[in-house]
Amino acid sequence: MVGPSNSDVDAVGVNTKMHSVQVEKLELTQLRLLEAIAQTGRLATAAEEAGLSQSAASHSLARLRRETGDALFVRTARGMQPTPYGHQLCVAVHDALTLLRAALAGEREFEPAHSERTFTIYMSEAGQLVILPRLIALLREQAPKTRVHVRRIPDGDRGDALASGEVDLAIGHITTMTTGFHQRRLFSERYVCLTSSDCALFQQGVTVDAYRQASHAIADSSGMAHWMIDQQLKQHDVVRRIGLVVPEFLALPFVVLGSDLVATLPSRVAERFASVLDLRVAELPVALGSYDVLLFWHERVHADPANRWMRQALATLLR
């Protein structure tokens, strides 16, 4: 076998015919060594910073020289200085290691006052009415640069978006998210009646007979568990006479106002509507069971500082 000619070998015995190097062949200690030599100009010091013995560092540098076909560093009166190719490689290595260190460090702490994080949350219309005013007020005070993106809870699979990180949290009466998810009870809710303050049918209160006779307004896409209402009412021999079905939950208070309609709503939502419109909140004439509003998040973000902060903020607001 004929070896390379003298013109192809430099002063440190490296074949100077350049060739591409596969990243897969490089080791992390080699990259750390290159960075350290570039910063210190001394192999012994660089070896110590890279966690290598001087002998191991010399062998590692020699291997890199063979693989790259370049001397990478040459000894000068000012210490080891990079060749043009060595300088190019060291800049790339430094940038890559800087990114890697930042990624490994991660977001160990969440600083709400400075964060520009966007939180994406699944939330029903009722949840938006009850939760968002309080949440926005809290964020304005503690995390003014953060943003909230609310998405309606889908009819289909709610878990995929949380598992992928597309959605951070889900809030509602949801029973389908189990495996891989954590949950926390935010509050217990119950149903009440919402009527116009001047509704003649309910001037003596909401009796069973009045409730049966009334024309009921419902929303068919509210995202709430309204199936619970009719199911439990039947146990009391009460069947609602539906007079109006609207597609949006937020239309209900405006169609109930000044009419003889009655809407059966979560208590917090009904009270919210009654606080801004001339409406009356009354107890149901029969006792219906309460239900829990839960907060869900996926295992992948369980330890995420920002997600954890938002979970605690919601729990504090709604407890």
Image: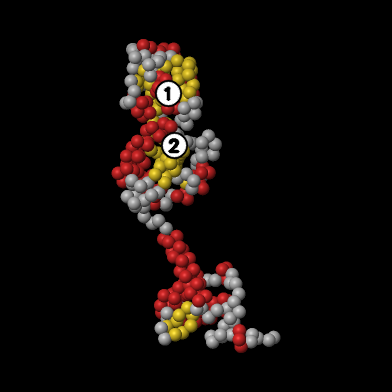
Is any part of residue 317 visible from this angle? no
Amino acid carrying mark 1 in the image: Leu
Residue 211 x/y as whole percent: 42, 15
Which amino acid type corresponds to the residue marked 2 in the rendered image? Met
Q: Nearer the viewer, mark 1 or mark 2?
A: 1
Under circle 1, the secondary element is helix
Q: x, y percentage for residue 197?
A: 34, 17
Percent position of residue 148, x then y: 40, 42
Q: Residue at x 33, y 12 (%)?
A: 204
Which residue reaches farthest left? 141
Q: Is residue 202 above or below residue 191?
A: above
Q: Is 280 above or below relative to 290?
A: above
Please give the name of the residue rendered at 42% of the width and 51% of the height, measured from the top-left corner.
304
In the picture of the structure, the residue carrying the numbered disc 1 is 252
- Residue 185 visible in the shown view: yes
Q: Quadrant of residue 280?
A: top left
First in sequence, mark 1 or 2: give its number: 2
Which residue is rendered at x = 54% and y = 77% of the image? Answer: 64
Q: Residue furthest right?
A: 1
Which residue is disc 2 drawn over?
123
Q: Quadrant of residue 19?
A: bottom right
